[in-house]
Amino acid sequence: MSPHVDLSNLAKVYATPKGPAVIVKDFNLKIAKGEFVTLIGHSGCGKSTVLSMLAGLSDITEGAIVLGGKELVGAGPDRGVVFQSPSLLPWYTAFENVMLGVEQVFFTASAEERREIVEYYLTVVGLGDSMHKRPAELSQGMRQRVGIARAFALKPKMLLLDEPFGMLDSLTRYELQAVLLKLWRENRITTLMVTHDVDEALYLSDRVVCMTDGPEAEVGDIIPVSFPRPRERQVVMDHPDYYPLRERLIEFLEIHAHKKKRAASTIPAAPATPLTEPLPTPATGTGVTLVTV
Amino acid sequence: MKPFKLDWLILPLLGIAVVLLAWQLSSKTWAKELPSPSKTWDASKDYVLKPFEKRGEMDQGILRFTWYSLVLVAKGYAIALIVGTPIGFFLGLSKAFTKTFDPIIQVLRPVSPLAWLPLGLVLFLGAGKQASELGALFTIAICAMWPTVLNTAVGVRAVPQDYLNVAKVLQLSRWKTLTKVLIPATLPYMFTGFRLSLGIAWLVIVAAEMLTGRPGVGGFLWQEYNALLYEHIILCIITIGVVGFVLDRLMSLVESRFKTA
């Protein structure tokens, strides 16, 4: 079966006065339909560049991206994007911000249907009572909820998240990760998320793609994360594979990300507990669960 | 010293008193032709206390004159905004447009209203009776539009990339991008431009009326100078200043409404 998303030999080169600057080179990644993939790497390694090429906000210098059998050209609402800053239009209410996109995508629907879509997604992200407030009246976390609602309400073929929780405090981040996971589980939208938070990557994704440092950043390692779903934060963290995986990710970021090219692909399989071992069934209702998804 | 409670009132009054004193002294010493404050008041009180009276074409209450001037300013200012705002948008949106027209704008911008007015009169020579009004409007519009043009252009260039990305991702049409993203994001800058433009339009009115002899504060000022009634010159100066101040305050109020948006 052909992958839902196929990034092949992707490269991004900027012309600078000192000659071409190669940000990303030979980037290859295939994502299956409904998969949640995280792109992790150091700040400035080019992971956001990859995402922004996928979003169509940045030109592709070399290579191609195929989404759902069609090569991508430019930006479009078939990809829902959640930016690092909520990027809401401050002169519109939360409702109007989401409606702006819904009008674009569901232009054949009746006004009533569109209103229902907007209200549904805003309610699901927990803004049922504040949907007619402007961004200035919302907390940073609530604004990002609107951003998530806006992306999902488009019913996109793919979801692109660019460090969506990077600007939030950790408690709010946990809450929003849970909201995201819930929406993702209900809609099963293929997702690529950029982050540099190892725990976030492990909690949310099916695979973690580690990028080497730029310039000429590429895929260094791909780590499958097979914690059972639906996931509960505490259960995931108590899982015997959790710390070995975490170690492996951190080791990659601390050591291998800096090594050039071929060196990165020779990372030893680090997990002490192989993932092939039977996974324990998650306990439900652990007293210490912070967020239940 | 601790600021006392009435300083907001007393200190400005003190400032006025200082200026009145200097004026009084000047009129008694080195500027004998300068009417003293009390003489100015005596000669002006008819115009101030019956501000809407019309005794003749060039002999009317001061607020009546002010009204004529304001109407002319409003028309010229409206033209400045209608022409200046789109030019500002084009400058902000298109590098090619900027490269093409920015040099000429920078050259035309510092030209004084006194220089534009004769050209305005020449341009509308064929308009007969309307010539002086059209010439004045042309001058007000062309002098007043630059702050609007330049501030709008700066505002458009300063629209956060985040907002533009949203428009791109949602594939908003050009029209929707303009009305739902660009214009709302640029409004605070536009209103700064509008306020500065209004100040200039009011400055220009006096020059325009002086040279065309139209009834209004500026026309009255020039006529009374020619009639050697110097007290009225001072009345006009004070009126022009107060009206300009009030206009600026009003525009600031409007502007601050958009600043918070």
Image (spheres, coloured by chain):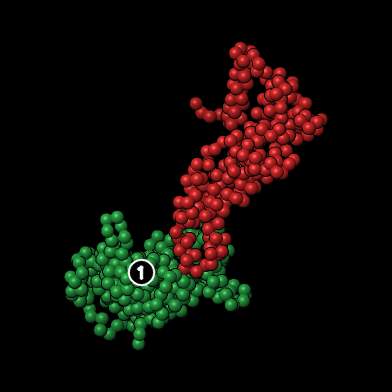
Residue designated by label 1: A60
Crowd rating for badge 1 (residues with CA inside 10 Å; few <14, some 14–19, many 20+): many
Residue B174 in sight in this render: yes
Image location of residue A228, percent across then percent down = 34, 81
Q: Quadrant of residue A287?
A: bottom left
Residue A131 in sight in this render: no
Image location of residue A6, percent across then percent down = 35, 78
Along the line of sight, which residue is nearer the eye, B126 or B87? B126
**Colour-to-chain, green:** A
In this structure image, what is the colour of chain B?
A: red
Residue that protrudes farthest toward the bottom in the picture:
A1
B246 up-or-down from B166: above or below = above
Q: Amino acid at mark 1?
A: Ile
Does A50 sit left or right of A130 as displayed? left
**Which residue: 31% across, 64% down?**
A13
Residue that protrudes farthest toward the front in the picture:
B126
Along the line of sight, which residue is nearer the eye, B28 or B99? B99
Along the line of sight, which residue is nearer the eye, A49 or B224? B224
Image location of residue A271, percent across then percent down = 22, 76
**Which residue: 29% across, 78% down?**
A224
SS of the residue under disc 1: loop
